[in-house]
Structure formats: C-alpha cells, structure tokens
Image: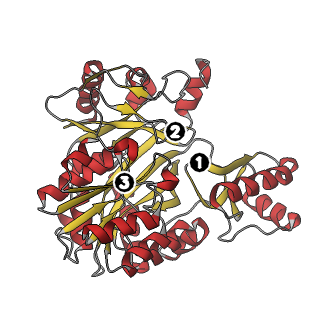
Amino acid sequence: MFGSVLIANRGEIALRIQRTCRRLGLRTIVVHSEPDREAPYVLQADLALCIGPAAAAQSYLCQKAILFAAEVSGAEAIHPGYGFLSENAGFAERVEAAGLTFIGPSAASMRVMGDKIAAKRSMRAAGVPCVPGPDAALTDDLDVVRAAAGEIGYPVILKAACGGGGRGMRMVESESALADALLVTREEARLAFGNSAIYVEKFLGRPRHVEIQVIADTYGDAVWLGSRDCSLQRRHQKVIEEAPAPQIEDALVREIGERCAEACRQIGYRSVGTFEFLVEDNAFYFIEMNTRLQVEHPVTEMTTGIDLVEAQIRVAQGERLPFRQDGIACHGHAFECRINAEDPDSFAPSPGMIDTWQMPGGPGVRIDSHASSGYRVSSYYDSLLGKLIVHGTTRDEALARLRVALDEARIGGIATNLPLHRRLVTDPDFIRGGVSIHHLETRLRRSGQP
C-alpha cells in the first residue's frame, strides 16, 4: 500500500491521474518543467517540484531528476501516464530499485511486449492471431529476406522491432523495391529507436484498427474490457476513437478478448494494457501491445463504468481485481475527439496563447483537458490540448451528441483541429461505421490536404 503518488507526466493526463488520486485520498506530487509551472494540476498538487527547462530530455525524460524528486518529496509510488517514460523498462526497474512502486507492468513484461518480434511470438503461443510473417528479425542476407517476403506474398511491410508512432515502417509492393526499402527502414529504426532490427509481415490493404483493453492483477486474474475502434488516423496518429468497435460480431470480439486475457495470464502481466489489432474481412491480426494507459481510455470508461486509473492504482497497491469477467458489460456507445493545437488544413503545430476556451456540456459529455483561456501552448510538447468524449445509449445518439458538442466548442487565439472534427462527423462513410485506417488520409488527399 502507498499513500502518495508522484505523477511523472504533464498535460491532460497529469490532471486526469491527479483527479483520481485525490478522490482516493492519495497525496499528489507533481513534477513539471519551467513553462508548465502555472498548469492547473501543478497548482492543485499537494507538492510541485520543477525538474528542468522546457526541453523534455532535460525534464520529463530525465530519469535522474524524477527519481531525485521522488526521494526528496517522500513519494511512495510513481505514475508515468502515457508517452515519455511510461513504456521504459529501465525506468520501471529504477523506480522499483529505489523502493518505490511503479504504477504499471513489470519491466520484464514491458521488455517482452515492447519488442514486437518477441510480442508476436508470445501472442502466437497464447493463441492470439497475428499478421502473417516470421517471428524473427530479418537477417542481412538479402536472399533470405527475399525468400521470406516471397513466401508471405507482396505487398509486405517492413517494421522496426522496437518501433512505435508510425516510425520505422515502409510498405514494399514488389521484390525490385525490397533492397532499397531494407536499407532505409533499418536506418530509420536505428535513428528513431537506437535499434536497427526490423521484421517483415503481410501488408493488409484495407484493415481497421481495433483494440482490446485489458487489466490484470498480481494474482493471475485478468479481464478484458471491451473493444475500441481507432481507424480514423493520419500518419498513424489517431484522430477519433470509439467504443465498442462497430460492425463486428459480439461473439468474435469475445473470443479475441478472452485470448488477450489468457495471454496476460501466461506472461504474468499486471496493470492496464491494450492489445492492438488490424481487422480485415472479420479476421483479427495482432500488431502490438501498449503496456500503459492509452490516450483513448475514456471511451472504455464511459461504456464500462470502470475508472481505469483507479483500477490501475489498486492493482499497483496489491489489491485483487474488484470485478470478474461475467460482471463486465458494455453499455451504450462512446466517441473521443483528440483536440490538437494545429492547423486543420496543413496540420502545422499552432503554439501560442489561448484567448477563448468554451467547452460544451450536457448529458453524456466529458472534457479531459488541462487547457483554459489564458493558457499558453508550448512548442516543446505534443499538440494535444484535450479530449472531447461523448456517450449515448446507441451509436447514433452518441454521434448526434458529438455533433452538437463540436458545434458548441470554441477555442480562440490559436488554430485547432476542431474544424476537421466537424467535417468528419458528417462524413457518410464514418457515419455508417467500419472505415479502414486509410480512410482519413484518402479523404484528405482528395481535398488537396497533406
């Protein structure tokens, strides 16, 4: 058990974690960079410590500074949020070595699931279906690679073994393009992740991106908490998410969910996590697991009624899961729009001062954001300002509420992607549901946008 939590993150997720900690009676300690000193979660913390300048490498990514802040503040646990150090196994080990609780999975689980090749191997062993392709890194022998790609069948996709965020990925349409693609992808992987290992798998033409949320405790209990569809993406970055994933049979989702929970039990996983799949022609193919809280976790909270941050904290405190699989149900439908400080046409970042901040309300509407009028958006961090989440008894009702909420939302002083969201919720294909991961980029190209 612990009574204080250091929140090693910033922005909306820092505030989200803080709210649950305060409700649970936990002392909150916030670390922050110099430009974030006036953020609401910093001002509301029981103790706030500045750990460095704006650059993330000298603040939010500086393990030494964070651990020193934990020591001097008397923190007993560290919550990493998402991004930054949330999936850094070395950091999790250092936290535990310092006698603190890391609110997340073990370093061993993070290492297995953080290596996509090892993750695929583990998932196949647990009966989770994977994208066709070998469970091994590609060698430097071009003939061996050609044979592997030929056996899979073109087009194929090359991926960094330790990749993420869409980096270190390249589609190859024919054998003639393979050699050059290998060189470029290996170098991208080396520069982005410090590891040039890559693997190859089948490129799926029109898949959907569907996720299964799980949570497991330290006693071998694991449950899955429904599905999410995150197919509306631009350059592998999610724009709108929804739960549950539409137009997929409940029995199929249940089968995959149960396999994911079993995979957690087999690898000794604890805490929250997300299994990500590509779905094509009603077939699920595992691509990776995120060993942390997801940005889009609110849509699962809205449809299950479970506070995922609370569950994550209780598991870290050594408690058993307070619910069983047969007690978990999906109620209604939820959407989440990521509100970013960026030009809605060029997608260029838009830092600066917010002079108008008017957010919607009403039944089924939730805003997760640290921003407000007078808040200065920094150019040093991710452009996410917050999330607009809506819930309805049906998908149609939730979508109607989302349209009204987007119409009410007003942000001035900087550019945001609110106009893009307003266009997307009137898109006939999106309204029908079940669009592929290529839908948004195809639509943007047709309109002349990058």
Q: Which mark is residue 9?
A: 3
Image height check: is 306 above or below 266?
above
Residue 16 placement (x, y as % from top left): 25, 49
Q: Are marks 3 and 1 in contact (CB under 8 Å)?
A: no
> Split into 4 quadrants, where in the image is the N terminus?
bottom left
Q: How is the image coloured?
A: secondary structure
Q: Residues within 10 Å of mark 3 (few under 14, many from 20)?
A: many
Residue 131 vs residue 43, the one in the foreground? 43
Identify the secondary structure beneath mark 3. Answer: loop
Residue 440 placement (x, y as % from top left): 52, 31
Q: Amino acid at mark 3?
A: Asn
Residue 288 placement (x, y as % from top left): 52, 60
Q: Which residue is mark 2?
A: 436
Q: Amino acid at mark 2?
A: Ser
Q: Which residue is mark 1?
A: 166
Identify the secondary structure beneath mark 2. Answer: loop
Identify the secondary structure beneath mark 1. Answer: loop
**Does residue 126 appear to the left or right of 254 in the view shown?**
right
Q: Is residue 313 visible?
A: yes
In space, the residues marked 3 and 2 are separated at their CA atoms by 32 Å
Q: Residue at x 47, y 78 (%)?
A: 108
In space, the residues marked 3 and 1 are separated at their CA atoms by 22 Å
Q: Are marks 2 and 1 in contact (CB under 8 Å)?
A: no
Q: Amino acid at mark 1?
A: Gly
Q: Residues within 10 Å of mark 1 (few under 14, many from 20)?
A: few
User: Residue 195 falls in which quadrant of the image?
Assistant: bottom right
**Does residue 361 appear to the left or right of 93 in the view shown?**
left
**Does residue 109 appear to the left or right of 439 in the view shown?**
left
